[in-house]
Amino acid sequence: MSKHCRTFIFGTTMKIWMLLIFSTLSVKVFAQQKTIVDGIVFDKDSKSRIAKVNVRNVTTGKSVYNTFKGEFNIDAKPGDVLVFTKPDHYPDTLKVQNNASLAVYMKRSAIQLKEVIVRDTMLNPQKQLEATKRDYTKIYGSLDNHNVLSVTPGLGAGIGIDALWNSLSRSGRNAGHLREIIERDYQQNVIDYRFNRTYVGSITQLKDQQLTDFMQRYRPGYYQVKTASDYEFITSIKANLKRFLRTPRKYELPQLITPKTEDLDKK
């Protein structure tokens, strides 16, 4: 084999070895520069997986959201800092140490209450009236007849016996009086149901005694409560609020004065 041939073979072999060494180093450098970090996000208290968590690599500025199974993967390398955020949880920060999968536990920022079934214990005015009628069946039975004239098929108009007895007997008059009281109470309940402290307070932003004074001063009537639309009702409250704020003390109730014991003894 000639000297020129041996030199060519040696040079080719060296180039191949250099290419292999360079390729190996390139792979190692690329692996160090680009690494996929994966993991699962859990709730710290319930230990259940949580979704919709934003995972941000602060070092690179890239971010992803985890899946509905709580799983995530993001481009990161050892030394990168990952920040996990979710609206109802406190943020959590982790520093990538290696390529191992991460288990992230996030603590809730608010206490999670157990499911509670709320039942309607406060009847609306109409239901209250119906319940009252069931309790007082006697006055809302045969006595509940306001028409003195009755119409009998084939016989024409005549005197209603129930209505006549209702108007003449003491028991009937008492029943009618009680029905009037129940009707007035019903109308006041209708007003209270719509013109309540929570609703009025949310519109006026008044609180405590100021809210009490305002509601006593500008309590609406039954007809307005029954006929006004939501827009008309709110507009009326806001108009009254402007009047109230101009001179709020004008509508304050006088302070109750408790007499001293010695003054009572003198009397």
Image (spheres, helix red, strand yellow):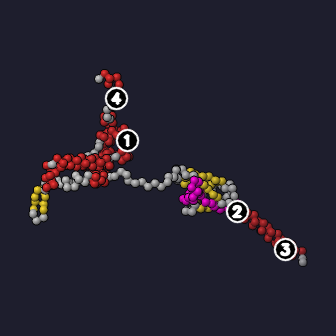
Which residue lies at the image location 66% right of the left edge and 60% below the top edge?
A: 101
Mark 1 Cα-neighbour bin, 10 Å: few <14, some 14–19, many ≥20: some
Q: Magenta span has 33?
A: yes
Q: Upstream in the sequence, badge 4 or badge 2?
A: 2
Instruction: Give the amino acid type for the residue marked by disc 3 in the picture.
Output: Ile
Secondary structure under tag 1 reads loop
Which of the two discs, 2 and 1, labels the residue nearer the N terminus?
2
**In the image, is residue 98 part of the stretch drawn in magenta?**
no
Q: Which residue is mark 3?
A: 9
| Mark closest to the chain's N terminus, 4 or 1 | 1
Q: CA distance from mark 4 to mark 1?
A: 28 Å
Left or right: where 96 falls relative to 240: right
Residue 108 x, y percent position in the rendering: 55, 52
Query: Which residue position holds label 2?
Result: 31
In this view, 210 is above or below 73: above
Of marks 3 and 1, the one in the foreground: 1
Work out how far the residue at label 2 is from the one at label 3, CA to CA, in angstroms: 33 Å
Region of the chain picked out in magenta, as a range: 30-58
Front disc: 2 or 3 = 2
